[in-house]
Image (cartoon, coloured by chain):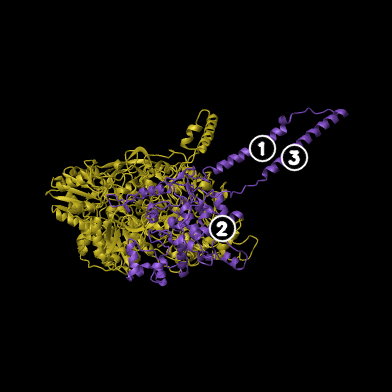
Amino acid sequence: MSQKQYWSGLEDLNKINSHTEVEGNEFKEELPFDLSDSLFGATTPRRDFLKFLGFSTLAATLVASCEMPVRRAIPYAIKPEDIVPGVPNYYASTFADGSEYCAVVIKTRDGRPIKVEGNELSSVTRGGTSARVQASVLNLYDKARIRHPYGDNAEVTFASADRAIMEGIGAKPGYLVTASVLSPTTKDVIAQFLAKFPAVKHIVYDAISYSGMLQANEACYGKRTLPTYHFDKAKTVVSLDADFLGTWLSPVEFAKGYSKGRKISAKEIKLSRHYQVEATHTITGGAADHRATCRPSEIGKVAVALYNAVASGTQPSLSSKNLNQLITKAAADLKAGNGMVVSGSNDVNVQMVVNAINDKIGANGITVNWTTTSNYKQGIDKDMAALVAAMEANEVGSLFLHGVNPVYDYYDNKKFTSALAKVPLTVSFAERMDETAQKCKYVVPDHNYLESWGDAEPKANYFSLMQPGIAPLFKTRAMQDSLLLWAGATQSYADFWKDYWMKKTGSQENFDKALQDGVIEPAGEMAIGGATFSGNIGDAVSKIQAQPAAGKDVIELVVYQKIAIGHGGAWSNNPWLLEMPDPITRATWDNYVCVSPSHAKKLDAELTGFSEVDSKKRVVTVKGANGYSVKMPVIVVPGMHNDVVAIAVGYGRDKKVGRAAASDETKGGKNAYPFLSYNGQNIENHSAVTITKTEEKYDVALTQTHSSYEARPVVHEYTLEEFTKDPNVLLKERGKEIAEFSTLPWIEEGKESKEPIVDTATEEGYRVNGTLYPNYPYEGVKWGMSIDLNSCTGCGACVVGCMAENNISVVGKDHVLKMHEMHWIRIDRYFSGMADEPDSIQTIFQPMLCQHCDNAPCENVCPVSATNHSSEGLNQMAYNRCIGTKYCANNCPYKVRHFNWMDWNGADCIDDNIYEDGRRDDINDDLTRMVLNPDVTVRSRGVMEKCTFCVQRLQEAKLAAKKEGHPMHDGAAKTACQQACPSDAITFGNVKDPSSKIYNLRKHEQMERTFYVLEHIHTLPNVNYLARIRNTEELDALNENKNEFLKYHI
Amino acid sequence: MCLRSVFALFIVIFSGNISAIAAPDGKALFMSNCAACHNPLKDATGPALKGIRSGFPDKEWGYKWVHNSASLIAAGDPTAVAIYTKFNKTAMTAFPQLSNEEIDAILEYADKYVAPVAAAPAGGGEEAAEAHGWLYTVITLALLVLVIILWRSNSGMKRIANEKEGIPNEKEIPIYRSKLTIAIFAIVIFILAGYWLVNGAINEGRQQNYQPLQPLFYSHKVHAGINQVNCLYCHAGAEKSRQAMIPSANVCMNCHKQINSYSGAAEHPLVNAEGKHVDGTAEIQKLYKYAGWDAANKKYILKANGEIDATPIKWAKIHNLPDHVYFNHSQHVKVGQVQCQKCHGPVQEMDEVYQFSALSMGWCINCHRQTEVKFTENNYYKIFEKYQDELKSGKRTGVTEAEMGGLECQKCHY
């Protein structure tokens, strides 16, 4: 174990009694819980028990004597040629949610999409996905989707809506408002529409605005566009409040590149260095080597300080010593070359300074690419402000809204709502009755992206095609079709699209190939080029310097996006995403006010807030400058700036958005968008607020404390310095733990060596001699997984990917509170540092899943052998044999087993036994159930379940190899989590195959960083981890009171 | 043992695998390759084959035509083009795999073919099953009675002897009230009831011999048995997918566009499970309805949107596995080379299919224990070095599915 002290949360750090208690208890409440109260609380429990016994025996007899129902096997009437029932088809397509982009492959089974994977042929996203991309397939089957067009909130036909809309457009100025448009054909369609109706203008509105960056780039380089960032080429990354691994711009793309710079092995010791300055605590901050916090309003000054340090070597004089130190170090590293600075600020001046720094350090053309530019964001805030003003002044005759929801997500949504009422013709293309669609005269619903033809140009000359995986489920119509129709075109969008790409690709053959690949890209490496900087940097710096510093007592609020929910939209109603724990707060189903520990003390929240064991959180009132106020619970997040609070967007939705999203006083969170501020040019994500505490409490379902190792060390972390000095440092630590047991106690030979180091022989010796059980010789195939803690960013794509692949149940907030969540893979978060010093906090993520132990504690205690070991090293779980004793979960040291406490999904043999809580229920709708993977059993109540290593995929890969008559190729079998991972943190394969990647990783390449969690208890896991190497001088960084701290906490 | 050889016989007959037989079997070849489109006596999709050789320009031409008719047509051969035009420009499937001898054998068979005469119903062939069981029962019962009589008289004599000698006799308890009897009786009842209960519970949900009435009387015997249509022709998924796949109606129509009546009623009258006579021709008409086929005009009935107006046939599902069982046909048929009949029984003998096997876990496991995988034939197994070595050294003769992990839970349950 490294010298560093980790704590999973403040309750762990402070050793709160209730936490210690929970640690010892496997299950949160006394058994049995709720439903059985009626039985055991009865006045004559014995008699009632006998009655129940008699009744159930009788019922069982009756049920057993019933006739078997006649089941039907219904083949196709006319079988489509390319579908073989039971064999999946894959279609390359494009995920696009407004400006969010990912090249994907849709897996369809018997004509319905059931899974979305990344498309490895794309050189933009390179096969990576995000949690939202993984969850997007559930949106297709969302019960809240609009099923037909609406006019004045009543069902109408397309024909009648079309007629009314075409007549209504008129000569008065009209506006088509869309989110950023990545699709070249859609741009053409819009042009046709605008040509037909010259009074109509097109403006782009992005709920999460990057307008400041676009304008800064225009001012500095003469192009209103975004560059491509090559994180893989950067040796030094400085991020000023940009959460580029989580939510900033194109996280999947950045995570892929970034993780390349974070790969390190003892053979090749080199590592990029990442500095992060931020106001809140993001996963990007967790990945950083050096981290310091500042107020969001100070980020401009930090940028200027960095600029000055880089340009003239000026010593920074910022509000904190840590910031100054960080800036000095960062400037020195940036000057060494291959650096890159990014900023999440939406202030034009800040972005101009960032551009100037990148220019000064020569990043343009190396890490910042101005030749192949990005199209992700196109919205300019001023356009939208002008539109709202025009609407208010009764100057707008028609308004068309696609992919936007300003009534919910505009900073001044009240103003927009009242202005909207003044527009005579309002048309929404929304796919659900969102807040804006409800207020529109006509709703002409668009398809889901899995039902659509389309395309995208995420970067200049990098195209990606979209093809449907299923015919439209409802009476919906592509937005482009509607526009073409209204423009009087006779061609459908699908034909228009095909003509366009046939022309572009040149031949049917090329077109077919492009459609099959899903992408059309220039050959070779991506073209990289710089640009000449011509911005007025002096002006930008003086404007920033002129901004008044925030007063000492002012609390600033940051409006941020959660990794799972993003900007809101359809994601707010996605139960998979709602139940995915946030990587930092580990909270599900709600939004809340994030505050730092010392701020929480002021709010008197420590009693409840500090301890994640206690779900009842102090409620506070947050009041913005514009008078908007909300009452929300407080979650304490170490690592937040002490004068900053943060609230996530995407919550507080209207009930028509869907049952899972619907919010009221008791559930669903609050809308944070009205806390955004407008500086006359750009919408900024922070504003000053006042916070007052109330006496109320509110339950927040946190998962952090649900699985505890009772303070056993599970992560290993070293500084680059330590690791460079002695690459064997981890092998020695492991040696101390296991070398002693690698030989039999009565054999003295080899025992006297001074410092035991783990090598292959020690590992093998420990395997055989460390136990009384006989050693099983594995033959042929043995599965193993390796997870690189240096690459893992904690983004959660694996968690949702696993849910989609393995039919994992959503349990709802009430049961998350009871620790009943079912995720087979979770991402544990550990802090180190001092709670009161946000800059000292270092965060590490560790994905935890069934370790498939070869000497598994769970297997030995199962009374019915429902869990046992396979000859391929899998810890198998036979659901139909499980009788639900839960002994296995008790005995599992990794806490990865999950029990089906309730009938979550109707797989139970008893009808109408399904658990309902009002929010999660739509997941069991007949429509939603189409998402289930037919190759995986839907588990019923009363059985234990856990990660299977995606055994259905392993079996499929073996079968494919057998059919072709060759040994399985390395990489033929991929687990869902591995495939979903955007940072390639997970390696999986056959450890018996010396040519496999996993074999080489463990035995050669990464031998020095390989460790097994809780290795000393001889569970022999088949999952190994690679130790985290932080490119920093000391692990409890920037901390002069370190010794004091250690005295109390170790 | 006997059963197994019957199986083997079925398999040989059914699969049409004639490679084991020296001379090409014209009938078998005809049935497996040609019968879908050709009738020996009358024109179907393709021409009648009896005497067709007389129309060939020469022998070689015939081989060329069979091997690849399209190339002949493309080359503009007049005879070829004439045939092609006559039969609605439907190109004949190419059979490059047929050797010249085999083609000869097929045509020979067609030439010699005579229409079957209605066969007289077979009778008198029934072999009276001679069971000797009853004899043993009678003897056993007689001996039991003898034992009881002897025991009774023995104990009676003992009592008399005791009386004579003045030893007091125990009070006689009738046998049905003896505690021992009651105890034994109770235990036996308990064991029997338990056995019955457990057996009943285990068999709960199993449907061996299940033979439901189907919406359409489809005789596997007529198709797979008498006409020797290969199983995989209709159940094409068996080699590719976990599901063997029930064919859609358009697959039926590949042959039934031509075959619009059941002409084998005399030879093989169709009788359903309830003993009622079934009119095969009427069933074909039912099929036409499902398939959307206009038999009078010989074309498909189209819906307004141009699609064929077909409705799927709602077959009653016979082989039902529980939801938590994963079974993959291709794994068994393609990789394991298991014959269909091994699990489905003599389908070619069944008019209406019934569930032949128990489809219980014990039944699966048993087969996995006994069956050897294609260890040397399939290169996939190269990586199992230990077994490879043992095979080479003669330490073992094969590797069973069980030894490859075929008994492990997560091979079928996940």
Looking at the image, tell me whether mark 3 or mark 2 is earlier in sequence order: 2
Looking at the image, tell me whether mark 1 or mark 3 is earlier in sequence order: 3
Asked whether the viewer can see residue B17, the reply is yes
State the image coordinates of residue A650 (x, y, percent, origin top left). 31, 47
Give left or right: position of A451 versus A902.
left
Which of A366 and A428 lies nearest the eye of the viewer? A428
State the image coordinates of residue A912 (x, y, percent, origin top left). 43, 38
* Residues packed near mark 2 inside 10 Å, few (<14), some (14 to 19) or many (20 plus): some
Give left or right: position of A822 versus A175.
right
- Colour applied to chain A: yellow
Respond whether the residues carrying marks 1 and 3 are from the same subunit.
yes
* Residue A779, quarter of the rendered image: bottom right
Which of A817 and A986 lies nearest the eye of the viewer? A986
Q: Which mark, by number, is residue B188? A: 1
Inter-mark Cα distance, 3 to 2: 44 Å
Inter-mark Cα distance, 1 to 3: 22 Å
Q: Which mark, by number, is residue B8? A: 2
Q: Residue at x 21, y 41 (%)?
A: A152
- Colour applied to chain B: purple
Q: Residue under mark 2: which chain is it in?
A: B
Secondary structure under tag 3 reads helix
* Residues packed near mark 1 inside 10 Å, few (<14), some (14 to 19) or many (20 plus): few
Inter-mark Cα distance, 2 to 1: 42 Å
Q: Which mark, by number, is residue B143? A: 3
